[in-house]
Amino acid sequence: MSRAAATGMRDALTAEITSLRRTGAAAAPRAELASGRATGGARYACALVSWPPDLSADGALVARAGGGGPWVPVSEVVVDGAEVRLACAAELGAGPVFVRADPARSAVALRSALDAAVGSGLAPVLLGERPGVTGEAPDAAEVTTGFDKLNLAQRRALTRALGSDLAFVWGPPGTGKTDVLARVVEGSLRRGQTVLLTAPTAVAVDHALERICDLIGTLPGFDEGLVRRLGPAAVPSLVRRHGAAVDTERVLARLSAPLAARAGGLRERQREVAARLRDREAADAAHARVVAADGVLARHHGKRRAVVTFLTTVDSELAAVDARLAEADAKLFAERRADRLRVERADLTARRAAGLTDLAAVDAAIARARGELAELRSVAAQAVARAGGASVRALRAAADGIADKVRRVDAELAGLPKRVLDNCRLVAMTTQRGHLGGLPVVPDVVVVDEAGMVDLPTAVRLASQAEQRVVFAGDTRQLPPAPACLVDRHASTQDRALVRRWLARDVFRAAGAVDEDGQATDDPRLARLGTQYRMRPAISALVNAVAYPDGPTRTGRSDVSSVARSRVLGAPLVLVDTSGHTPASTYRDQLHAALVRECVGRLEHEGVLPWREPRAALAAITPYRTQARVLDAYLREHLGPRFAGVADTVHRYQGDQRPVVILDTVAGPFYSGTGKDSATCRLVNVALSRAQDHLVVVANVDRLRATLPGDSEMHALLDHLRVNAERLPVEELVPVRTADQPPSAGPAFVPAAEVDEAVALDIGRAADRVEIYSPEPAAARVAAFAPALREAASRGVPVRLFTPRPPAAEDAGWEVVASATVREPLVITDNTLWHPPFDLLAATAADAPALRMESAVACTTARPRPAPVPAQRVAARTHRPPPRENTPSAARSTELRP
């Protein structure tokens, strides 16, 4: 990487970082601190006022003092009770300090990573500072699946990508670019190489990864961490079909489950053996006690025998003494001898009595010993029965063996994360995540999908990580890089020039594979795909007319739709022309939103959309985030939460496709660009080419033609639709109803001549609120509605007129609020929205019908945001009674501000 290029990219990133931090500050959650004081060393201690729960003190943060000034990085943030300590190189001052997440975190990481990328990997080849090898891979057919099923251009692109250090694949929508990339990854893995797959959006990453997983599912280790998806997956089908193999947490859970079960079984066995060992030891101890008790009993029996022998001896001696006494009594003069014999007999009698006592004691002891022995034998028998026949030695050996197995299984469980990490050879993630580092592998091959959105510094960073090969695939006529600096009105001319040179050009142009006009060069590293398989011929022809008139793609699929027949989808191309219905504002359009809602509702009612996952078959696309939010809210309110995410911006649908696409061309400056390389043409190309079977375009054709530049590619779009699209009348989706007809919950047009009467009827039915937004109220027109408004106010209904030009104050009985944000006419009664294309209270009349819709979402999204200046109360509510308790008007009074 040359020093000039490195310096230019770093300077451009610095300008981009400044713009990123300067823009988008209002939407980010932020903490508020007060009473800051410097504590030395660029450190501050501040009193905590508020800290939002979704703001992490450990993340990358920026701060600014007061309500203005630049956002500057802060570090070492510690939230300690009511005090926050932080380090900041800038002077924060004594006023309030605001802290929020750094929106430029990824750009900061990329700028830091550029220094490490100097001269690394294939970055010098990308920048033309070192020649690279460009060739054909002779083994492409052997290392990939279905090589023969690819068309000639796809096979050439695949062999070129597998045989070159640096390759570019230019694939217009539906030409199989992702199929080629999937096989590049497959071939690299089958060669034993490690791969990094990346793309600017999570959807593009997931679609490519799903194709890859279909090809490599039989590779060894596929289910054991071969593939790792870093970051949350955004495509449900990838999660459903391959989530168990690409989500590391699920892989670990699946692999650890049998080990954990085995460890649990071993521990249960360990407990059983320990219990048996305890029983065995208890049995042995019981046996020892039985033996001891037997000994005691034996001793007692021995003592008894001794006592019995003693008594027998005493009894013999007594008998002898008695015999001698009898003999002595028979003889004369033997008194003295008899006395001695009587003394001896008394002694023997005493000894006999003592012996009898001893015998009784011994018999009692024997009885006790026998009882204890019987009990001990019973206990011992039970213990032996529990312990089984194994010896203590055998059981201790078994316990030691099980403990060793438990240790080995625990070690295997502990080492499982490393084993899964070591098994990883394919990492898939977004390019932004790649800036933050932490790759689990050193990639031999880097594959970048949707590279037309990749700026040069990101491409250089990715190329620097490739050891052997880098492949960029994309379409230079789809979404380009989108630096914030180019739309930052505070950015300097010099910063914009830097960003335009170094960040706004895609890698195809920067490397010379495509010239600055978006035309392919004769660079041998570039392979172009030319046959598309996504769109029906009619849709492909429209895309060619808008984006590829100089090199139209061929169609390789049938003209048969994959979805059920529907009145809305009468042809591949359908136009809903809202000409004659003037949009009231840019960036959002309630009529278009109502038409999209009705289209989707009919598709749902006719069974076109799958019940569980309507997003799988339908996309509602619009250029602006504001309108995307309106569409999303309309669909969720009307059809339920299953339809969340169906409506989104063009950028969010890059890399995706759907059988049915509804394109809402809401008014705005988006269409001002001209040329195939303009953001207008690129975004329109992406939006149109997401459709596989049916494309419904909602457009105000007359307004677009009146406001488009003469050489805009949008003229080609409108001309092609005029000739080739089936027209679906607006009135078929939004019918016309007269004032005397019952009100409809769905959207309806009311003829201009009957709008006053119909609005007055709705005011008369109002129970919660009446809000009129009028940019140019005229006193006469206000007076015309005064009776209906005064009657509603008399019933306790809050009645307010919002206008930037309040009429003269009078005792009108309702409230007039000065609001600078009122730029379009609206009437809201309860949850009914009136969206006339003219100011209902203006002096001039109009003949266009007004749109009426019963929808809380329509009221919320149409209502202007509060004015930046405090609202001014103009007319007092002199005749309005206080709200009734427990009524909707009382409960919802806080919702009535614009």
Image (cartoon, rainbow, N blue to C red):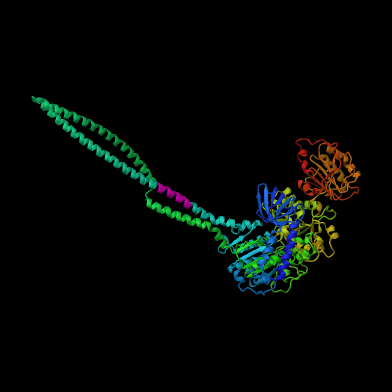
Residue placed most toward the observer, 657 or 537: 657
Task: Report the number of numbered marks.
Answer: 0
Q: In the rendered view, would you say 169 is above or below 705?
A: below
Segment tinted magenta in the rendering:
265-278
Q: What percent of the width, then of the height, locates residue 161?
A: 65, 70
482 and 622: which is toward the camera: 482
Give x and y (percent) for residue 482.
74, 62
The answer to whether residue 212 of the structure is visible from this angle is: yes
Considering the whole magenta stretch, tell me its main secondary structure. helix
Which residue is rendered at x = 11% and y = 25% of the image? 335
Quadrant hosting residue 661: bottom right
Q: Can residue 645 be seen in this view?
A: no
- Tell me if residue 277 is in the magenta stretch: yes
Residue 276 place in picture, x, y as percent: 41, 48
Quadrant of the image occupied by residue 816: top right
Seen as rendered, the residue at the extreme front is 40
- Quarter of the figure that contains the N terminus: bottom right
* Rendered location of residue 98, percent (x, y): 72, 52
Relative depth, front residue between 382 and 583: 382
Left or right: 274, with 25 as reference point: left
Query: Please, is residue 217 above or below residue 64 in the view?
Result: below
Picture quarter containing residue 15? bottom right
Report if residue 156 lies within the magenta region: no
* Above or below, 277 relative to 439: above
